[in-house]
Image (cartoon, rainbow, N blue to C red):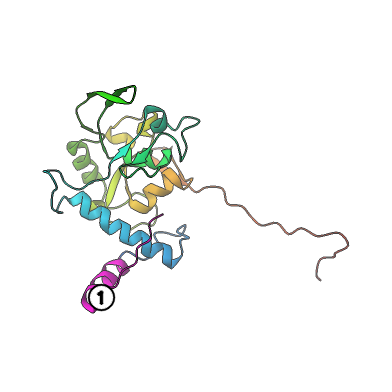
């Protein structure tokens, strides 16, 4: 986890609060996040939007982005490649395979071959979804495809209904625009997106229903 602690001047604080408040509403009936969680996610969403727009200053000629080092096994989510194996950020922090699969939906992928931990070949960087496919997806949708979500299309990223990491193709019929929250829910939150006729259906994870258990010698209240 990363803890952020900052003191802002009144104007800066007002600007930040206004931005966060604009993204702080629940996204549909199934959004059970607390207000605190929604505020934290809103801040991350603002950062992702700034990164995706490419308006931040470049460093060494490259726009700011997230780098993840992973393996084919971790990308596919194969057994034994969980949180502490197979994938890590530039700073060495581990990343789960599910998070890697989400980022790979709309990432730039570069093959690196190693021999005895020494890099022997680096392939060309390739987009998982081409700019033309992304433009076509925007032409078909006005907002996030999740039910009840009002995030505009420019605040979404392409999601593969059949996961790209598991062989799903990057064609228009297999792509859906999802906002940061719903994209994370599908990959890391246990949600499923399945085809239903000409459309798709969002299925929430099974929820545990508390069951009242009567202890020895106890009676139910009248």
Residue 68, quarter of picture: top left
Which secondary structure, mark 1? helix
Task: Between residue 212 and residue 222, name the one nearer to us.
Answer: 212
Question: Quick check: 123 above or below 196?
Answer: above
| Residue 71 x %, y % | 37, 30
Residue 110, quarter of picture: top left
Residue depicted at 38% across the width and 51% down the height: 182
Task: Between residue 108 and residue 175, name the one nearer to us.
Answer: 108
Residue depicted at 39% across the width and 48% down the height: 184
Boundaries of the magenta span: 1-22
Question: Quick check: 96 above or below 79?
Answer: below
| Residue 8 x %, y % | 26, 73
Residue depicted at 44% across the width and 33% down the height: 77
- Looking at the rendered image, the quarter that the N terminus falls into is bottom left
| Residue 47 x %, y % | 26, 56
Residue 102 shown left or right of residue 60 in the figure? right
| Residue 81 x %, y % | 46, 33
Q: Is residue 85 magenta?
A: no
Task: Between residue 26 and residue 86, name the one nearer to us.
Answer: 86
Q: On the image, numbered disc 1 is attached to which residue?
A: 14
Mark count = 1
């Amino acid at each position: 986890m990363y803890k952020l602690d900052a003191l802002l001047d009144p104007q800066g604080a007002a600007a930040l609060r206004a931005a966060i408040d604009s993204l702080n509403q629940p996204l549909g009936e199934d959004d059970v996040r607390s207000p605190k969680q929604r505020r934290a996610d809103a801040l991350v969403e603002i950062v992702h939007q700034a990164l995706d727009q490419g308006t931040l200053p470049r460093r060494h000629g490259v726009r700011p982005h997230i780098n993840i080092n992973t393996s084919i096994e971790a990308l596919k989510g194969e057994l034994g490649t969980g949180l502490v194996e197979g994938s890590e950020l530039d700073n060495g922090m581990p990343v789960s395979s599910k998070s890697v699969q989400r980022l790979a939906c709309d990432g730039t992928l570069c093959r690196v071959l190693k021999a005895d931990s020494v890099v022997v070949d680096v392939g060309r960087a390739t987009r998982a979804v081409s700019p033309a496919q992304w433009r076509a997806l925007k032409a078909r949708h006005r907002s996030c495809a999740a039910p009840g979500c009002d995030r505009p299309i420019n605040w979404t990223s392409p999601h593969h209904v059949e996961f790209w990491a598991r062989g799903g193709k990057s064609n228009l019929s297999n792509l859906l625009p999802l906002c940061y929250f719903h994209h994370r829910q599908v990959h890391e939150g246990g949600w499923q997106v399945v085809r239903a006729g000409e459309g798709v259906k969002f299925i929430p994870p099974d929820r545990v229903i508390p069951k009242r258990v009567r202890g020895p010698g106890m009676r139910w209240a009248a």
